Image: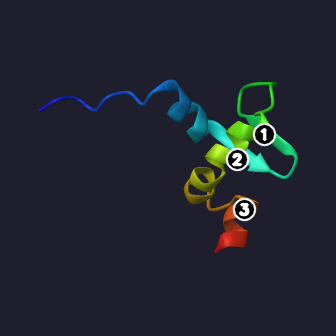
Amino acid sequence: MAANPVPPAPVRSMLRATLTGANRRIIGSDSPMDDATARAFKPRIALLDPDNQIAAMKA
């Protein structure tokens, strides 16, 4: 049985990302997500982060 692979960098970044209003930042980084990246990850982040305001609006 093969060991679990490490997720690729974009997935790891997505898991660390937060989307709260205009403050879209990757934890541990000072650089904001660009709008296209934020739109691409928004649904997944909402599912992963139940405390996120977006998830609360969708629930």
Residue 32 % position (x, y): 80, 31
Q: Nearer the viewer, residue 34 or 21?
A: 34
Which residue matches tag 3? Answer: 54
What SS does tag 3 mark? helix
User: Residue drawn 80% across and 25% down?
Assistant: 31
Query: Helix, strand or loop at disc 2?
Result: helix
Q: Amino acid at mark 1?
A: Asp
Q: Report the residue at 73% width, 71% height from top.
A: 57
**Quadrant location of the N terminus in the rendered image:** top left
In the image shown, does 50 or 54 lie closer to the viewer? 54
Point out residue 17 in the picture as x, y percentages from the top left corner. Answer: 66, 39
The mark lying in front, picked from 1 and 3, is 1
Residue for badge 1:
35
Question: Which numbered marker is on residue 25?
Answer: none
Image-quadrant location for residue 36: top right
Q: Residue at x 79, y 41 (%)?
A: 24
Residue sticking out furthest to the front: 36
Nearest to the eye among marks 3 and 2: give it. 2
Local packing at callout 3 (Cα closer than 10 Å; few below 14, some 14-19, many 20+) is some
Q: Position of residue 40 (x, y in %)?
A: 64, 45
N-term-proximal mark, 3 vs 2: 2
Q: Amino acid at mark 2?
A: Arg
Q: Are marks 1 and 2 in contact (CB under 8 Å)?
A: yes
Query: Separation of disc 1 and disc 3 at Cα?
Result: 16 Å
Marks 3 and 2 close (CB-CB < 8 Å): no
